[in-house]
Amino acid sequence: MVNAVWKKIASGKVDPVYLLMGEEHHIFDSTIARLKKALPEIEDASIIRFDLEETSIEAVIEEADTLPFLEDHKLIIASNASFLSGQDKKRNEVEHNLTVLEDWLGNPSPTATVVFIAPYEKLDGRKRITKKMKEMTTVIEATRLQGNDLSTWVQAEAKANDTQINAQTAQKLIEMVGDNLLMLATEIKKMATYLSGGGEITEAIIEDLVPRTPEMDVFRLTDSYINGDIENTVKTYHDLLRNGEEPIMLTSLIAGQIRLMIHVQSLRRKGYQQHQIAKTLHVHPYRVKLMLENRRLPGEARLLGILNNLAEIDYKLKTTGGKRERLLELFFMEPIR
């Protein structure tokens, strides 16, 4: 949905009222940036901003209905629309005349675009005003993008930075960075700058420019080990050692990945969906997606066996000397039974 609305804005078709809801703040920022681009007469200094926890909705409507000065159009951002959520009212929070808002939504100003921002996971759908807002505004759900939507967003972001990336390479970038839109946008902008505003983002460029974290490489290492790819597992392990990572720390991170796999399997058996599992375990939905789609993922009994072996390795690493890195290497070279 968000990509469809952005495409409409890019074509110059700007609606009078938008409702941005959810917790992905980068989508808020990207939408406002696209509106500014579609309304070239709007400058940063002329964007009018209100905090609805401090200012009444009547003030926002009055500003929207006042003819713009020295401009043809206004862009008004009204943040923290808490009256749409189920949250308890804060002390000293301003009172809003929601009847006035309902009436105005039926006939919004033709010389202003008003963006209401509700940065909450869920809105209270039982409220009359919430139903009216969803019915009478252009709604953008700023939730974590997944699957094809996320890949499409990456490609659109690359295009917005005057470069391009194909679907397969976009997937590679997502695997390395995760599904955080701000982090993805930052890396895309960096690679576009490297390409000097042209050309295509390739997997080689991603490998060269996108930084890796130990957690990211351990995720890849564990995935290779679980899938029986001993050669790639050992290669990744040696790369981590060359980067100064310690076997004790790597053992702990790998054990954490195995425990996550066990929890994911357990919640899946209980009927949890991908987003529910991710929320319960406080991990990126994309990591959960990869585990759920991995048909070679061992059963819980085998994963518990691997966890037990890692506990023994951890004990040996802490109590023995010599070439301790060999302990994990031998572990990786033994097939999973």
Image (spheres, rainbow, N blue to C red):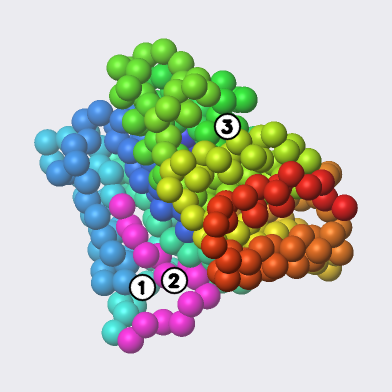
Whichever of callouts 2 and 1 sits on the residue coming sooner in the sequence is 2
> Foreground: 167 or 94?
167
Dominant secondary structure, magenta: loop
Part of the protein shown in magenta: 77-91
How far apart marks 2 and 3 lie (CA) works out to 41 Å
Q: Report the residue marked by disc 3.
A: 172
Instruction: Name which residue lies at 52% across and 23% down.
Output: 203
- Identify residue type, mark 3: Lys
Using the rendered image of the protein, determine whether residue 259 is visible from the camera's viewpoint.
no
Few, some or many residues within 10 Å of mark 1 (<14, 14–19, 20+)? some
Name the quadrant of the N terminus: top right
Q: Which residue is mark 1?
A: 96
| Residue at image point 32% right, 67% down | 52
53 lies above or below 173:
below
**Type of amino acid under label 2:** Phe
Is 84 one of the magenta-colored residues?
yes
Label 3 packing within 10 angstroms: few (<14), some (14-19), many (20+): some
Left or right placement of residue 138 versus residue 228 in this view: left
